[in-house]
Image (cartoon, rainbow, N blue to C red):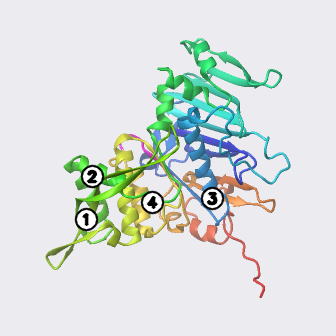
């Protein structure tokens, strides 16, 4: 489970932004919306977190920051020597090309806190660290710092708890790559569970549900239980769909060769979803492209949502409410806050404009966050709890009234 994420100097986020999934001591909806951790410092963790904000407030950049950290951990070893990465720092400062950007994520893994982060520029990693908490005092499994006097050289420190051929991993880690990624490629076993949090347990959709139907199609075709769950989820949205099937049609599959960067095209057969609509006792078949944008997005999200709930993973979605009815968005959030549907502690982090989630016990007060951009074009992330809202307070009315910030301020339009 994700406990906390920090980012600094990324796109419109100049100063450090912190998104915490630690639950407050409030007992409201505690049994459904939170989960015990077994930790002394963070007793319970949230299942969901919603980020509100005006257009261009920076809420999407929090999602992009998570995506960038995820991508660096998975693919940093693919960066060529002396090749710059695609880091987008906060640009409204004279030293934006060299000012460092930092990322840090804290996970709960097998009862322990793993606090991992790194600092970098477009040209090289400046520092990287991993702290593991088995008790209140952390074990610094490794720490790596760029030595400014000895260019391209790093100073490393290790805990006795971290074992293995450290010198081999050091020598193989270039200034453009992460030590974590390199060590994993060289068969480090101790770091595998942390690496898997990024590689296997984190799904990020920066474009809402516009991800195509491939994953959901493969998920539904695995077995009849999966197919039944997909149909049930879509039918619950009152789409009129009672059946999902697949037909194979000739098509072309595009693939990027990661070794050469050259696009490859392969002629193959593609599974096209068919949706059966029930009308007056008769089932009528429609293809994926004939359905509404909302139905397409719902089907595209159905596979990832059901898979993440089943496996206890982390789903991160920008604009979850894109083309989806508010009641359907509520249903998706409710699934993550339902212990019967979410027995393994899956989490959902999303941005939204859907204010209907703010009232009616759909979210706890500590699950609500706001993003706002100031006059210097700097984005800030802050929790609803900063405003000490009363229990039962009309949050939707307060938000739309500007009490908590995170809404657009309209000027006078000139002719």
- Secondary structure state at the residue bearing disc 1: strand
Secondary element type, mark 2: helix
Looking at the image, which is closer to me, 168 or 329? 168
Residue extent of the magenta highlight: 343-350
Q: CA distance from mark 4 to mark 3?
A: 32 Å
Does the magenta portion include 346? yes
In this rendering, the label closer to the viewer, 4 or 3: 4
Residue annotated with mark 4: 209
Q: Is residue 394 visible?
A: no
Which image quadrant for residue 161? top right
Secondary structure at numbered mark 4: loop
* Residue displayed at 61% across by 13% down: 167
Residue 81 left/right relative to 225:
right
The residue tagged with tag 3: helix, strand or loop?
Answer: loop
* Image marks 2 and 4: residues in contact by CB distance under 8 Å: no
- In this rendering, is residue 262 above or below 173? below
Residue 68 picture location, percent across and down: 60, 44
Q: Which mark is residue 220?
A: 2
Q: Earlier in the sequence, mark 3 or mark 2?
A: 2
- State the residue position of label 3: 389
N-terminal of the pair, mark 2 or mark 4, is 4
């Amino acid at each position: 489970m994700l406990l906390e994420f920090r980012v600094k100097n990324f796109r419109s986020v100049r100063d450090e932004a912190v998104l915490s999934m630690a639950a407050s001591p409030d007992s409201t909806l505690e049994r459904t919306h939170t989960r015990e951790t077994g930790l002394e410092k963070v007793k319970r963790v949230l299942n969901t977190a919603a980020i509100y904000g005006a257009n261009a407030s920076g809420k999407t950049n929090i999602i992009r920051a998570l995506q960038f950290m995820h991508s660096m951990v998975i693919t940093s070893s693919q960066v060529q020597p002396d090749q710059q990465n695609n880091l987008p720092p906060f640009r409204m400062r004279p030293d934006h090309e060299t000012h460092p950007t930092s990322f840090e994520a804290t996970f709960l893994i097998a009862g322990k806190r793993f606090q991992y982060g790194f600092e970098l520029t477009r040209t090289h990693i400046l520092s990287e660290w991993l702290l593991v908490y088995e008790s209140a005092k952390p074990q610094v499994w490794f720490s790596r710092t760029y030595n400014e006097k000895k260019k391209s050289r790093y100073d490393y420190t290790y805990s006795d708890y971290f074992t293995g051929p450290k010198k081999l991993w050091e020598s193989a880690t270039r200034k453009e790559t992460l030590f974590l990624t390199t060590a994993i490629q060289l068969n480090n076993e101790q770091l595998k569970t942390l690496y898997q949090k990024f590689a296997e347990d984190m799904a990020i959709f920066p474009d809402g549900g516009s991800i195509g139907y491939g994953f959901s199609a493969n998920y539904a075709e695995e077995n009849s239980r999966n197919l039944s769950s997909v149909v049930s989820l879509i039918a619950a949205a009152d789409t009129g769909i009672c059946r999902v099937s697949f037909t194979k049609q000739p098509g072309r599959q595009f693939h990027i060769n990661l070794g050469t960067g050259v696009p490859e095209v392969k002629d193959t057969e593609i599974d096209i979803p068919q949706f059966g609509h029930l009308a007056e006792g008769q089932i009528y078949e429609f293809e994926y492209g004939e359905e509404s944008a909302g139905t397409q997005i719902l089907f595209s999200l159905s596979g990832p949502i059901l898979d993440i709930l089943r496996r206890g993973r982390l789903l991160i979605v920008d604009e979850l409410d894109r083309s989806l009815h508010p009641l359907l968005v509520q249903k998706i959030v409710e699934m993550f806050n339902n212990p019967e549907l979410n027995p393994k502690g899956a989490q959902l982090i999303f941005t939204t404009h859907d204010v209907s989630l703010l009232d009616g016990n759909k979210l706890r007060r500590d699950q609500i966050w706001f993003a706002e951009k100031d006059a210097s074009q700097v984005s800030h992330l802050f929790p609803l709890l900063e405003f000490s809202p009363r229990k039962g307070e009309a949050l939707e009315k307060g938000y739309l009234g500007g009490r908590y910030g995170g809404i657009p301020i309209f000027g006078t339009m000139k002719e």
